[in-house]
Image (spheres, rainbow, N blue to C red):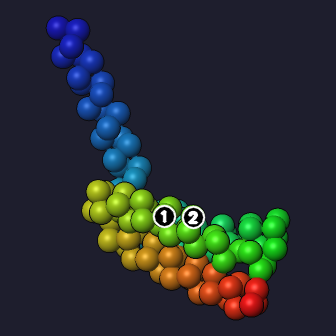
Amino acid sequence: MLGLNTLKIVSLISWSLMDIIMQDNDKKWWKDWLILLGFFHGSIIWLFMAINLNIQVAWISFACGGLIGFFLILIAIGYENPRFAKATIIGILINLLLSIFSFITSA
């Protein structure tokens, strides 16, 4: 009997977490925090590295931003959120462009 009550609590927790993550697609994209995370994750990493290290070495931020973006895409696929996946791909491309800019300025 104890196991059944525990199962009910766990299922309630997982559904409330899923409700938080699975937001309705009627929201505007700039009001959805997951889309903003996917869109800006790479550029924030690049900006942090450019400010704290140097703009000439900020090109290495693509290694970190690309890897984080890959796992964000996997999360988006797991929660069946295509807008989050598309925003993350755009964020990775923005990070790539900023990294190319840093690489060109270092040469």
Provide the residue designation for mark 1. 67
> Percent position (x, y) of residue 21?
40, 53
* Residue sticking out furthest to the front: 107
**Secondary structure category for the residue under label 1:** helix
Q: At x 32% / y 38%, what residue is drawn?
A: 14
Q: At x 35% / y 49%, what residue is drawn?
A: 19
Q: At x 56% / y 68%, what residue is drawn?
A: 63
> Percent position (x, y) of residue 100?
62, 87
Q: Mark 1: give few (<14), some (14-19) or many (20+) Cα within 10 Å.
A: some
Q: Name the quadrant of the C terminus.
A: bottom right
**Secondary structure category for the residue under label 2:** helix
- Judge from the rendering whether residue 41 lies leftward or rightward of residue 87; answer left or right: right
Residue nearest the viewer, comparing 39 with 57? 57
- Judge from the rendering whether residue 8 lies leftward or rightward of residue 71; answer left or right: left
Instruction: State the mark number for residue 64.
Output: 2
Any part of residue 28 in sight: no
Residue 16: quarter of image? top left
- Under mark 2, the amino acid is Cys
Q: Mark 2: give few (<14), some (14-19) or many (20+) Cα within 10 Å.
A: some
Residue 24: quarter of image? bottom left
Where 98 falls versus 37 (above or below)?
Answer: below
Q: Name the quadrant of the N terminus.
A: top left
Assess whether mark 1 and mark 2 are in contact (beta carbons under 8 angstroms).
Answer: yes
> Percent position (x, y) of residue 80?
27, 62
> Percent position (x, y) of residue 87?
45, 75
Residue nearest the viewer, comparing 41 with 49? 49
Q: CA distance from mark 2 to mark 1?
A: 5 Å
What is the tally of numbered marks visible in this picture?
2
Any part of residue 76 in sight: yes
Q: At x 63% / y 81%, what residue is drawn?
A: 99
- Under mark 1, the amino acid is Leu
